[in-house]
Image (tube, rainbow, N blue to C red):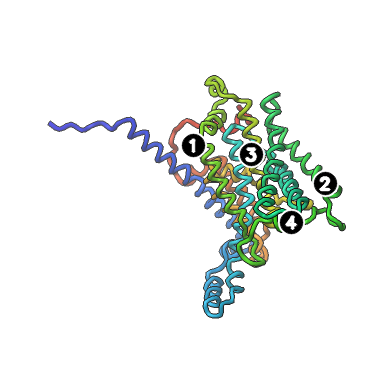
Amino acid sequence: MSTTAAPSPDAGNKENKRNSLAQEILVPVLAVITGLIVGALVIFASGENPLVAYGALFAGSFGTPAAYIEGFKVLFATGDNAALIKAIYPFTESLVTATPYIFAGLSVALGFRCGLFNIGAEGQFFIGALCSAFVGYSLKGLPMIVHLPLALMGGALGGAVWGMIPGYLKARFGAHEVVNTIMMNWIAFRLSDWLLNGPMKAPGFRPITPTVEASAELPRFFPDPLRFNLGFFIALVVAYLVYWFLFKTTMGFEIRSVGANPDAAKYAGMNIVRNFVLVMFLAGGLAGLAGASQVLGVDHWVGQGFSAGYGFDAIALALLGKSHPAGVVLAALLFGFLRSGATDMMSIARIPIDIISIIQGMVIVFIAAPDIIRWLYRIRTIKKEETVLTRGWGS
């Protein structure tokens, strides 16, 4: 008489974990696709052709196959790389745009992991940019191997201190980090206006800082007009370090535990105050690096309106990336490609650049309400214990 062994509970748990992981990946992907579909409907409703618009968007983000082929043909035939440089320009610009997004997205995601809503990444971005610019133009005669790290550390430290202030207020006095970081944003904006029109103003009429020294610039890999630089690879390394810190260290485990349930973490002997301050310090440093990478790698000076909203977009990136460093990198690349290609979509297909904001907004709506995606695509919900990412909101 044969008997069939019952499936073990461990096997069922592993299957649920695999299905849950698949959904964690599938839902954001479907959210992006659905956002693009909604954008196409808006474009069609405005009387334009969505295929032409998205073709221009793709060409502005990646370039065209014909341009790549022609560029390589000319390079192999004559040795002239001008056509190839022109062909790869859109793709490299997308990576340049994505670089500060990676840093800023990691900043917000790190706060989420500890249950903190770091809405102050924009202000930390500004302070980091100003600090790195100051180190970049004020120190002269230093070799690059010394000057460049100092400028990067200056930006990181400036953003870290700016982020630590609301972290300390939250930990010591219970002040809500959302209110504090919003106020710190406004202080940073007004402080930067004063500095750019006063102590840090370069000679001339424009409210900008002096240009940083060449020894403080992030090296570029191609001749002008390509601006692709070392900052992109530094961002990838930092993303891996954040992953290692969060998921491979005791301190990272504490941070995630505090974010999941601070009361239980406190009962287990974890220092809540230290974790709040540390996370906001590190989050501010990451946002400061975003500003530093833009100054040292792209613009080489800071002016009024310097940021293109990187700090605020970072909130969307952290949500889209599920507060995981790998997800944040992919979301940053998506936003970089969308923003880079939007210019061509506007100039070639005559589509307002605001369509990109609509697409980004719809993606975030679908991410914030994943049940909509599950309902639209008939995805079975897998019950699991949810982690609270921001206890300050409704908890």
Image-based side of 299 in relation to 253, left or right:
right
N-terminal label among 3 and 2: 2
Vertical comparison of 354 with 22: above or below? below
Residue 394: % across, % down: 62, 29
- Give the spatial CA distance, label 4 vs label 1: 38 Å
Q: Is residue 38 left or right of residue 196?
A: left
- Give the Cα separation between the discs numbered 1 and 3: 18 Å
Reply above or below: 69 against 162.
below
Numbered circle sitting on residue 213: 4
Label 1 CA crowd tier, 10 Å (few <14, some 14–19, many 20+):
few
Find residue 322 and report its horizontal and vertical position in percent: 54, 41
Element type at marker 2? helix
**Mark 4 is on which residue type?**
Glu
- Residue of label 2: 195
Q: Which residue is mark 1?
A: 248
The CA span between labels 3 and 2 is 24 Å
Rendered residue at 44%/33% (across/down): 383
Disc 3 crowd rating (10 Å Cα; few below 14, some 14-19, many 20+) is: many
Q: Position of residue 243 (x, y in %)?
A: 52, 41
Residue 246 visible to an observer of this rendering: yes
Disc 4 is placed on an element classified as loop
- Labels 1 & 3 near each other (Cβ < 8 A): no
Q: Nearer the viewer, mark 4 or mark 1?
A: 4
Q: Residue at x 79, y 55 (%)?
A: 210
> Which residue is depicted at the point 48% across and 42% down?
24
Q: Where does label 3 land, which residue?
A: 283
Q: Nearer the viewer, residue 218 or 322?
A: 218
Say whether disc 2 or disc 1 marks the residue closer to the N-terminus.
Answer: 2
